[in-house]
Image: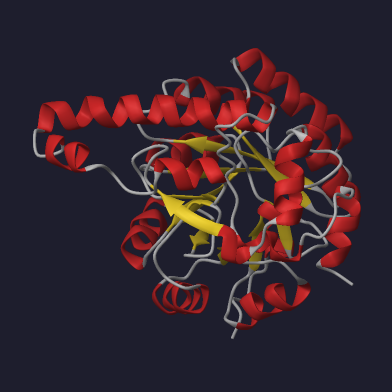
């Protein structure tokens, strides 16, 4: 049975899902269009170069927010994000509806967000993480399954959702593998309180990524999504372009050997992260022969570029 408290109850919205935060893809225009439909959206704080730009975006969404809409910011809470604390401070000072934490301990975010009356949702990939987040006092869990785009979990949606529902008392928001209303209804039937949907919105009119990236989401499907360690050292799902096929998906023999040396492992991972991130940034802005387009299997039912409003209708009608 679904958790008693739905995402609509938590955020005061009409829709049982929100637009997931996507690096380089999410923007205020997309979130505002979602709020107009009685929904919500979330943007990675790292989409903004500085705190001033982040604050400006929060104010823009706040001014446009209707009574049945909500918006949030996603914060990476591990040491790789050097702007983490100033991003958190900006969210608390300006006021957002919710914060999603990823890739680290949410302790500090939960403490400071609670003072500012901001809800905190934590990305988790298994029960152990979920129990820690629940103990710290978060408001809901984002169940990142093995169908998610970008950095994904290992468990299939049904197994992950049911485990989290059985072992925690928190609402569970499913993330990954939702390309249609049928998929959404299935996640809710497993016990999810709502969903986070990302990849289908890459090919939206409001998205500011290149037309080539959008068209890739139209022309490729679920079978074209592969997982690579070449971007950040952590498994990440991308579209299997000719360039991705050329460079391969796994670490080289030399890279694997170097990982046996703790000192070198740290710096190799950092260098790979910087290079991989730069490839993703360049690919999102314009087409190059080094196209690395991050997406999940839920692009399967993306058949044309259309407005956020029309894409939302795909999940509600």
Residue 88 shows up from this direction: yes
The x and y percentages for residue 132 are: 33, 56
Picture residue at 39% right of the left edge, 75% below the top? 167
Lateral position of residue 225 relative to residue 30, left or right: left
Q: Count numbered badges in the picture.
A: 0
What is the image's colouring? Answer: secondary structure
Picture residue at 25% right of the left edge, 42% below the top? 252
Picture residue at 54% right of the left edge, 55% below the top? 139
The x and y percentages for residue 92 are: 59, 29
Give the camera-side residue of 147 and 191.
147
| Outermost bottom residue | 1
Lateral position of residue 251 relative to residue 54, left or right: left
Instruction: Tell me the quadrant of the picture where the N terminus can be found.
Output: bottom right
Picture residue at 82% right of the left edge, 60% below the top? 303
Instruction: Tell me the quadrant of the picture where the C terminus can be found.
Output: bottom right
Give the camera-side residue of 242 and 265.
242
Location of residue 33 (image quadrant) = top right
| Outermost left residue | 261
The x and y percentages for residue 22 are: 62, 42
Location of residue 4 (image quadrant) = bottom right
Question: Up-down: is 66 above or below 16?
Answer: above
Question: Up-down: is 18 above or below 255?
Answer: below
Lateral position of residue 159 relative to residue 210, left or right: left
Question: Up-down: is 49 above or below 287?
Answer: above
Residue 79 shows up from this direction: no
The x and y percentages for residue 284 are: 65, 32
Lateral position of residue 141 relative to residue 206, left or right: left
């Amino acid at each position: 049975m679904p958790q008693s408290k739905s995402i609509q109850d938590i955020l005061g919205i009409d829709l049982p899902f929100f637009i997931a935060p996507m690096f380089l893809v999410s923007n205020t225009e997309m979130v505002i269009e979602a709020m107009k439909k009685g929904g919500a959206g979330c943007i990675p704080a790292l989409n903004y170069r500085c705190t001033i730009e982040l604050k400006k975006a929060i104010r823009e969404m706040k001014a446009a927010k209707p009574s049945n809409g909500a918006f949030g910011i996603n914060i990476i809470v591990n040491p790789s994000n050097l702007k983490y604390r100033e991003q958190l401070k900006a969210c608390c000072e300006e006021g957002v509806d919710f914060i999603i934490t990823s890739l680290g301990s949410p302790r500090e975010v939960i403490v400071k967000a609670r003072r500012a009356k901001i809800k905190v949702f934590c990305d988790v990939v298994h029960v152990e993480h979920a129990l820690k987040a629940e103990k710290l006092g978060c408001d809901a869990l984002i169940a990142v399954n093995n169908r998610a785009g970008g950095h994904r979990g290992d468990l299939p949606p049904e197994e992950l959702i049911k485990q989290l529902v059985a072992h925690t008392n928190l609402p569970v928001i499913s993330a990954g593998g939702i390309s249609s209303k049928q998929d959404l209804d299935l996640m809710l039937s497993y016990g999810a309180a709502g969903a986070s949907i990302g990849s289908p919105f890459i090919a939206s009119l409001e998205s500011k990524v290149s037309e080539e990236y959008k068209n890739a989401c139209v022309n490729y499907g679920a079978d074209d999504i592969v997982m690579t360690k070449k971007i950040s050292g952590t498994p990440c799902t991308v579209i299997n372009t000719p360039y991705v096929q050329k460079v391969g998906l796994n670490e080289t023999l030399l890279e694997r050997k170097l990982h046996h040396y703790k000192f070198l492992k740290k710096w190799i991972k950092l260098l790979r992260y910087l290079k991989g991130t730069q490839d993703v940034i360049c690919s999102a802005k314009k087409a190059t022969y080094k196209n690395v387009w991050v997406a999940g299997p839920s692009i399967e039912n993306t058949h044309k570029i259309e407005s956020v409003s029309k894409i939302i209708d795909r999940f509600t009608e």
